[in-house]
Each structure stands twice: as structure tokens, then as C-alpha cells.
Amino acid sequence: MDGAYGILSILPLIIMLGLVIWTKRIFESILVAIGFALIIQYGFSVDVIYAFEEKLYGMLASEVYPWILIILILFGALIKLLVESGGTLGFAKYAKKVVKSGKSSLIVTWFLGILIFVDDYLNNLTIGAAMRGITDEHKVPREMTAMAINATGAPVCVLIPFSTWAVFIYGLLLEVGVAEGGLITEYSKLIPFIFFAIVMVGMVPLMALGIIPKFGPLKKAYERVEKTGSTFPEELTDTIGVEFAETQARIKEKGEPKLYDFLIPILAVILLVITTEEIMYGLFLALAICFVLYIPRKKMKVSEFFDNFFEGAKDMLFIAIFVMMAFIFVEVVEELGLSEYVITTVEPYLNGAFLPVLAFIIVAVLAFFGIDFWGIMILMFPIVAPLAQASDVNVYLALGAVVSGAVFGGMSCFFSEQMLMSSTSCQIRPTDQAVCLLPYALVACVVTAILYLIFGFIL
């Protein structure tokens, strides 16, 4: 479409972000932004309603969203079963032998984020369930726990050549004619240049140890904990906090929590994802293992097992609907020509030593505004790779910049899947985490941009 609506394509983004900052309500803000984008296309007419209805049907009939919906349902069910079986408390019991302070609880969270590297969904949704009780005991704000999980989700996945991200990006390397060897060989050439992921993963332990100081909304979250003792944002303390404590007490009454009730299903997911590169198979296997593991030992009755299954699935309903709205929002702004407008505007400057830093900034901005981070990589790889080769710039450096921008946007966007999942696993709202994370992500972004600028000249 080549930026058909020009600068108008940016207005829905501005409206959405403005409403999020003003109201701290993401879902309502994104609905308003979708409506505004459709009005730009169709004017003030009934066609806006018809177009929105068509988007809903189209999303349900697409290849990507139904897969995400099923994955979320299975994850929700698995997490609920792990919690109700006492598995997560069993994990917490052993983790407490290592965790002696708030700092060490975050280091363990960081370590788990590196250990569960195969998929960012698995990482974001399971670590929160395992660690939130431990970090609560050591008075770590839930916002910080969610940040530590988010920052070791996608950033870790792109730094390991066995992850779902690596498989996808390797396919792009083949498509643009850069990769000639196998997955591990070729992807390993890219890893050293994914600077944002390296910086972000390195920042987490520095934040945990207090080497990087607390500032902005995160500092206020820690002050809240010191003042009130609540690790939850104020609006959630009376609801989520009480519910969480009651759940722990109820599970402990059923018997001694066991580590293997958590560990065996999670290891099954990890191993099957590594061998098959398909997370859905791993989730089906984990659920089957839960049934065999819990029912004969009377951890729960068959009826309780399926009650927990559907309760867990229901817990993912909000995030599933929200992801749908986020996808529709991205689709309507793309129909306005947002990506094309931005890229064609800056493409004349994408040359020479400045190519890596500019590629990083462009992708980071687009991904932060909600443009699908995998989609923007599909769009940018065929543009950046030949420009790098023509400008005698290290092609892996330039493409690493594209991946870095996608990772920044994916983890920092207020309504991205990573933000939603890591926040959900810590039982807080996405805005609670997003406002705390953004200042630190921007610091990492500035460091990353400087590195791309320097390496663009020396490589």
C-alpha cells in the first residue's frame, strides 16, 4: 500500500498510547484506537461496524490466532493443575533452601529464565507460577518479579540456537540467502550481534543486586512494599493478594507439596519442544503426565482434575481476547500503511555504517507500537540484508540489529504477548509491569544503539 494514508496512519497509535498513559486501561484504549483507525478508512458510517465484525471472523479463521488460543488454553490448564497439585509449592520448598533474600529470589528467577529457554510462552507463564510466592516472602514487588521474567523470556530465546525464535529467524536467514550451513552453525554467527538481548539479560542480575539503582515507578513499587508490606499494586492488594494467600493455605491442607509434581510435567514440555520444535505436543504430554501423576496418588479426583483444567483455561480468557484485539489493532494500522510509511520515509538513510543503528531504531519503534515482531522481521530482513551487503557492512551485525529491535518491542510494548503473559503469571495488570519496565528497557535501548553505531564503523 506504500503508506497510503501517510502520517494519518500514526494517529491511532498516538491515541492508544495516550489513553493507556491517562487511564491505565489497555483493553479499552486499544478498542478506541481500533475504532479510530476504522473511521479513518471508512468514515463515520455503519461500514465501521461491518469492518470490525469482519476482522473478528477473520481472526478466528486465521492460521495464527487459533493456534495461540489453543496454546493459551493448554497453558492455563497446565499451570492451574501444577498449582492445585502442590507442585509449585513443592518447587518453592526446595528453592527456599537457596533463596535467602529478595536479591537471591530474583537471581533464581533469572536463572530459571535462562534454563527454560526453548519458548518465551513457556518461560513467561510457568516461572511466575513457580516464583511469585517466593519473591512475595522476601518482599519483592510483583512488578519486579514480572520484569525479571519478561527480560529473560524472548531475550534468552533469541540467544539460544535451540529455541522457537532461533528456528524462525534461521528460516529468514535462508530466505534472504545469508545462511548456507545448518541451524546451529549459521544462527551462532548472529547471536553475538543481538546486542539488546545480551544487554537486557545482563541487566537483570545487576538490578537484583542493586548495582543498577531503582528509579521511576519501580522505585515507588519498592517504597509501597516498605510502607504497606504489600507486594501487589495497591488496587489489587485486597483481591488478588487475599486470594493468593487462601490458595496456598488450601493446597497445604491437602498434603505435603512435592517437587516432582511440578518438575516432571515441565521437563516433559521442555524435552518435547527441543525434539519436535512444537510446543503444543509438549503441553499435551505434560497434561497427560499430570493425569497419571495426580489421580492414582489421590492428589485430586478425576472430576477435580477436569474442574481445574477448565478453571485454568478460563483464567486465560482475558489474555486470549486481548491478544485478538491487539492483532486486530495491528491489522487495521497496517491497512493504513503504517509500516510502509515509516520504512519508505527512512529507507534513503539506511546505508553505510549507520545502517545497523537505524535498522534497530526503526524496528524497535514499530514493534513497540504493536507491529508483530515476527512480521516486522519478515518485512525488514529482505531490505536490510542486501543494503548491508551493498554498503560493505557486516550482514550479521545488521540483521542482529533487526532482531534486537524486535525483541525490545516485543517485551516492552504495553500490549505485547510477552507483556501480557509475564504479567498474568504474576497476577498483575500489564500496565503495572509496563510502566516499571519501560525506563530500564529504554536504558538498554540506548546502550544497544551506541553499540550498533560503534560496530557499524569498526566492522
Image: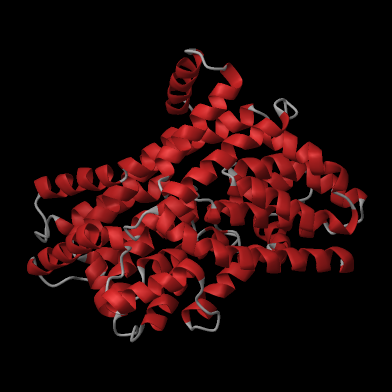
Residue 434 image offset from top left, x and y in percent: 47, 57
Residue 317 image offset from top left, x and y in percent: 31, 41
Q: Nearer the viewer, residue 246 or 187?
A: 246
Coloration of the structure image = secondary structure
Q: Is residue 263 left or right of residue 340?
A: left
Residue 142 image offset from top left, x and y in percent: 36, 66
Residue extending farthest to the top is 46
Residue at image position (57%, 35%) is 12
Residue at image position (52%, 41%) is 16
Q: Nearer the viewer, residue 437 or 247?
A: 437
- Against 96, residue 325 (above or below) is above
Q: Is residue 181 visible?
A: no
Q: Is residue 11 left or right of residue 2?
A: left
Residue at image position (47%, 79%) is 208
Q: Quadrant of the N terminus?
A: top right
Residue at image position (69%, 45%) is 172
Residue 417 image offset from top left, x and y in percent: 47, 48
Q: Nearer the viewer, residue 449 or 57?
A: 449
- Against 393, residue 16 (above or below) is above
- Against 102, residue 381 (above or below) is above
Q: Is residue 364 left or right of residue 427?
A: right
Q: Nearer the viewer, residue 86 or 19?
A: 19
Q: Quadrant of the C terminus?
A: bottom right
Q: Is residue 382 visible?
A: yes
Q: Is residue 380 left or right of residue 282?
A: right
